[in-house]
Structures are given as C-alpha cells and as structure tokens.
Image (cartoon, rainbow, N blue to C red):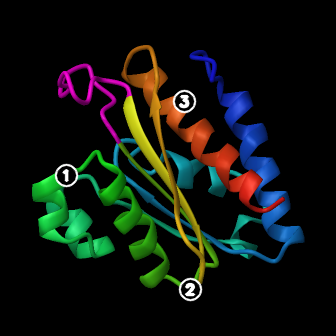
Amino acid sequence: MKTDVSDDFLHRLAEQVGEAARVNRQTLVTAESCTGGWIAKMLTDIPGSSGWFEGGMAAYSYEAKQALLGVRPQTLEQHGAVSRETVIEMVSGALVHSGATLAVAVTGIAGPAGGTDDKPVGTVWIAWKRRGGYPTAVTFHFDGDRDAVRRQSVAAALHGLAELMT
C-alpha cells in the first residue's frame, strides 16, 4: 500500500464500498481503535450512506473495547490490544452489538511512540466479518508518521470491505 494516501483516494474507496453495499443490500458497522472513527467518517461522507451504514464505535481504551465490543479482559491481558485475537473479538462484537451484515475492525500502533520490538510502530491488525460467517484478520506493517499509518489503515480497511462484497 502506498504511504501517501490522499483524501481523494480515501473518498473514492468509500464511494466504491458504498455502491457495493447498496447494490448487494449490505449494511456496515465499524469498530475502530487506532483510526479513531476515520473509517466511519469516510463512509458517512458519501451521500446516501444512511441506507447502508449502521454505525461505528471508536473503542480506544481496553475498557471501551470490553464495554462496547465485548472483548474479553483475558484476551487483552494475554495478547494485548494490537493482536489477531483482539481484532477478531472486536469485529465479532461489532456485529453482535449492531444490526449490520458486515463489520470491519482495526487496532494498531500509529505512533510516534508505543511500539516494541515485537510490535513496532506501524503494526496494524484489520479484521472483516460477514454476519454468520468467519472473520478474516490480516496484519499490516505500514510506514510513515502517525497520519500516514492511520491513512493506510483506513484505505486497507475500506479496500477489504469492497473485496468482501464482490
């Protein structure tokens, strides 16, 4: 993924997701940590999004992940917020707590601090799930500053939603 993700590029991706959701009669929900609601913002920038966007949760802290998305405390203690296990519980929880048919969840380390040798800045987990289906979770290692990591995360999340509906 390119590091210089523009607003126009994100808008075009969101339009593609919206059109696919409309055509396929899907509704979407987001569960976001490091992107802080940016995916939901991009989707709701699209006219007509009320027909296919259910809602979004920005769950940044451990407590919010538990309360809003049902992430288990043991998962956070054993694997941390930036993990396959956590993002899968986030995406599943988003569907449980909404009426949507598709969900995307994102958790990562956007920086500039917070990285470790194990999980450096730019490490992002994204999961997608269709109601009644199994989640898909992918880890990314994005380059750049905080803004660049977050932009790339939003682009990857939107791209995955579009692919899920094709």
Tag 3 secondary structure: helix
* Mark 3 crowd level (few <14, some 14–19, many ≥20, 10 Å Cα): many
Residue at x 45% of width, y 16% of height: 143
Q: Which residue is mark 2?
A: 99
Q: Quadrant of residue 156?
A: top right
Pick the residue in front: 16 or 86: 86
Furthest residue toward right:
23
In this rendering, is residue 70 above or below 30? below
Amino acid at dot 1 = His
Residue 83: say if magenta.
no
Residue 88: x percent and y percent?
40, 62
Q: Height in image: 61 above or below 10?
A: below
Q: Looking at the picture, does residue 133 appear above or below residue 127?
A: below
Three-letter code for the amino acid on which mark 2 is drawn: Gly
User: What amino acid type should be assigned to the residue bearing mark 3?
Assistant: Gln
Q: Residues within 10 Å of mark 2 (few under 14, many from 20)?
A: some
Q: Which mark is residue 79?
A: 1
Q: Residue shown at 72%/65% (left/top)?
A: 49
The x, y position of residue 58, in whole percent, is 36, 57
Mark toward the start of the polypeptide (3 vs 1): 1
Q: Nearer the viewer, residue 43 or 26?
A: 26
Residue 85 horizontal side relative to residue 104, left or right: left
The stretch in magenta equals 108-122
Residue 117 on image: x %, y %: 19, 21
Pair 1/2: label in front: 1
Q: In the rendered view, does 124 fall on the left or right side of 137?
A: left
Q: Which residue is mark 3?
A: 152
**Comes first in the chain, label 1 or label 2:** 1
Q: Secondary structure at mark 1?
A: helix
Which quadrant holds residue 147? top left
Per the model, the C-alpha gap separating discs 1 and 2 is: 28 Å
